[in-house]
Image (cartoon, grey):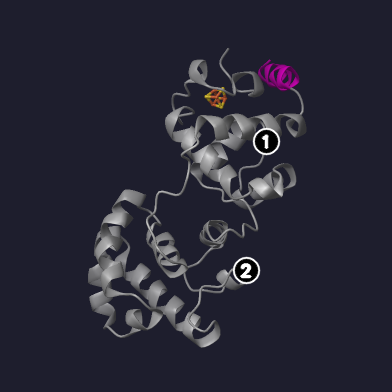
């Protein structure tokens, strides 16, 4: 019964390859302001902000980095203070020990192998301590060189609800999305889903009646 209902819903909306264009277009019109909420002025500040954003909110990170970036301007600055001092300076973002350690390891490698510059390639970014695939994808996309699609909790939920993937694992979801979403949209697509997820397609209570994707979504409560 449930299965035939899902099949019927998928038939109603049509194949995902035909829906992806209008989905991106409508979300872009609806959330023209969708962008990363972290504040940064350079690739290095971007990298630090994304590293600090694990397990906390962007608002909290911005509060901490406002002072942090006055004190730490170059990779060398993160290595010039004792570990305990850096831990205190990032304390309010949580997991401060691991984060301070990752920051120092990252800065060391940036200096040793990348002339102190933030690399643009995903495989190079992923060599930095504490930089997993999602972090690397976020940094690359913000630097205008998206090489994949960021999958966070909103992207995962919305991709599933929209019938763009049947996978649960973020790496497999990303694999489905890069096949489907035009490359030029890899950078903005996650932001669109994240903002739509926050504003309309809530985890517990999706507001389908106010959703611009209602006729394109197999999960719409019609
Ligand atoms: S129609 Fe409902 S379930 Fe589908 S994307 Fe919109 S809010 Fe989410």
Q: CA distance from mark 2 to mark 1?
A: 26 Å
Q: Is residue 139 visible?
A: yes
Horizontal side, residue 21 vs residue 208: left or right: right
Q: Which residues are magenta?
A: 1-13
Per the image, is 12 magenta? Answer: yes
Query: Image quarter for residue 41?
Result: bottom left
Q: Identify the secondary structure beneath mark 1.
A: loop
For residue 173, above or below residue 197 = below
Categorize mark 2 by other alpha carbons within 10 Å: few (<14), some (14-19), many (20+): some
Ligand 1 neighbours mark 2 (CB distance < 8 Å): no
Most frequent secondary structure within the magenta stretch: helix
Per the image, is 35 magenta? Answer: no
What residue sits right under mark 2 in the picture?
121
For ligand 1, give the image quadrant. top right
Query: Image quarter for residue 96?
Result: bottom left
Query: Image quarter for residue 63?
Result: bottom left
For residue 117, above or below residue 171 = below
């Amino acid at each position: 019964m449930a299965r035939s209902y899902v099949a019927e819903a998928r038939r109603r909306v049509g194949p995902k390859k035909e829906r992806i264009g209008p989905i991106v277009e409508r979300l872009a019109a609806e959330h023209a302001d969708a962008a990363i909420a972290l504040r940064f002025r350079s690739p290095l500040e971007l990298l630090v902000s994304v590293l600090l954003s694990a397990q906390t909110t962007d608002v909290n990170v911005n509060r901490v980095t406002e002072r942090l970036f006055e004190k730490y301007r170059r990779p060398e600055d993160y290595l010039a203070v004792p570990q305990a001092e850096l831990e205190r300076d990032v304390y309010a973002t949580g997991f401060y020990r691991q984060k301070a350690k990752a920051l120092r390891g990252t800065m060391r490698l940036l200096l040793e192998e990348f002339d102190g510059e933030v690399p643009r390639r995903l495989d190079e970014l992923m060599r930095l301590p504490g930089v997993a695939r999602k972090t690397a994808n976020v940094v690359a996309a913000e630097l205008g060189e998206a090489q994949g699609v960021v999958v966070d909790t909103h992207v995962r939920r919305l991709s599933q609800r929209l019938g763009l993937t049947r996978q649960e694992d973020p790496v497999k979801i990303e694999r489905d999305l890069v096949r489907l979403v035009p490359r030029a949209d890899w950078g903005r697509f996650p932001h669109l889903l994240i903002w739509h997820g926050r504003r309309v397609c809530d985890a517990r209570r999706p507001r389908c009646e106010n959703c611009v994707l209602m006729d394109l979504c197999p999960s719409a409560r019609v």
